[in-house]
Amino acid sequence: MQAEAGPVAEPFSKERLTRRIFRDETLLVLALSLGASGVSALISFVGSVTRPGGLKDQAATMNASAAPGRPWLDLVWQLFGIATALVPVALVFHLLLREGARARTIGFDRDRPWPDLGRGAAVAAVVGSVGIAFYLAARGLGFNLTVVPEALPDVWWKFPVLVLSAVQNAVLEEVIVVGYLLRRLHQLGWSPMLALVGSSVLRGSYHLYQGVGGFVGNLAMGVLFVLLYRRWGRVGPLVVAHSLLDIGAFVGFALLAGRVDWLPTG
C-alpha cells in the first residue's frame, strides 16, 4: 500500500526568503527595543490626556532613582539598566555581521573621529537651541507634559551616570532607528520617502509620553537626522549630536533646576 504523502512545504525563492527573514528580524528587534517603547509611550500618553488637569501640570520624569535611600544599590540598578538597554544594539551588530556587513557599514566606527565630532557638535548646537524653545512653547500651550530630565540623589556618581545614560540613549536610537532600520527598509523595498517617514514616526512615537510636543519635535528631529545620514553615510555624527543634546538636558537640568525662573521643574 502506498504511503500517503505528507504536507508539501511552500517553495521560497532565495530572494523571497531573505526578504521574509529581514522583515521578521526587523519586527523582533523593534519589539525588543524602541518599538516596544513606542507602544509604552502611547499607553502613557493616553493615561495623561485622560487624567484630570492639563498636560503641563503633569510631569514625565527620566533618570529617576531606582533605590531611594540606598545609593550603592541605586548605582548598580542604574548601570544595569544602561547595560541591558544596549543589548538590542549588540543584536543589530550581530545581524549585520551575519549578512556580511559590519558596524562600519552604517558609519559607527572610529575611522573619522574629528569630522564626526565636529558635525555632531554643530548639529547639537542648532537642534538644542531650537528644541528648548519648542519645548517651552509646547508646554506653555498645553501640548506637553513638564519634562524632568533627572531625579537622581545628590551622590558622587550622579553626573557620570547621567552622561552614560545620555550616550546609551544616543547609541540605541541612532544605530537602530537610523542606521539599521533604514538599511532593512531599503532591503525590503521601501521607497526613500516612505523609509524616512517610517523612521521619523518611530522616533516621535517613543517620545509620546512627553505629550504632543514631544512627538512632533522628535519627529522633526528624525527627518533631519535621516537626511543627514543619507548625506554623510554615517551614524557617528548623529550619535555625537544626540549624546551632547541629552548630556545638556540631563546635566543642565541638574545644575539649573530651581536656580532659573524659565526652567519648569514639575
Image (cartoon, rainbow, N blue to C red):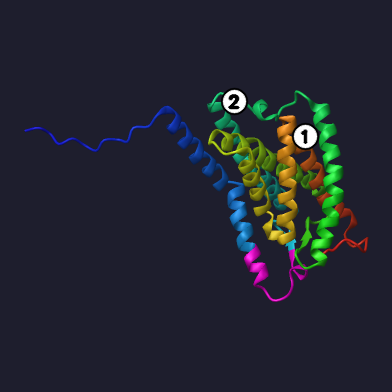
Q: CA distance from mark 1 to mark 2?
A: 20 Å
Position of residue 22 in the picture relative to residue 149 (left or right) = left
Q: Disc number at residue 237?
A: 1
Q: Badge 2: few (under 14), some or many (20 or more) residues near its Cα, within 10 Å?
A: few
Q: Disc number at residue 101?
A: 2
* Quarter where residue 244 is shown: top right
The segment highlighted magenta reads 45-59
Q: Residue furthest bottom?
A: 52
Per the image, label 2 sits on a secondary structure element best described as loop
Q: Please tell me whether residue 50 belongs to the stretch shown in magenta.
A: yes
Residue at image location 81% in from the left, 51% down from the top: 250
Residue 203, image x, y percentages:
67, 48
Position of residue 120 in the picture relative to residue 205 (left or right) = right
Q: Badge 1: few (under 14), some or many (20 or more) residues near its Cα, within 10 Å?
A: many
Position of residue 14 in the picture relative to residue 253 (left or right) = left
The tag earlier along the polypeptide, 1 or 2, is 2
> Which amino acid, mark 1?
Pro
Residue 231 drawn above or below residue 206: above
Find out whether the residues at labels 1 and 2 contact each other: C-beta distance under 8 Å: no
Q: Disc number at residue 140?
A: none
Residue 36 drawn above or below residue 136: above
Per the image, label 1 sits on a secondary structure element best described as helix
Q: Residue furthest right?
A: 260
Residue 84, image x, y percentages:
63, 44
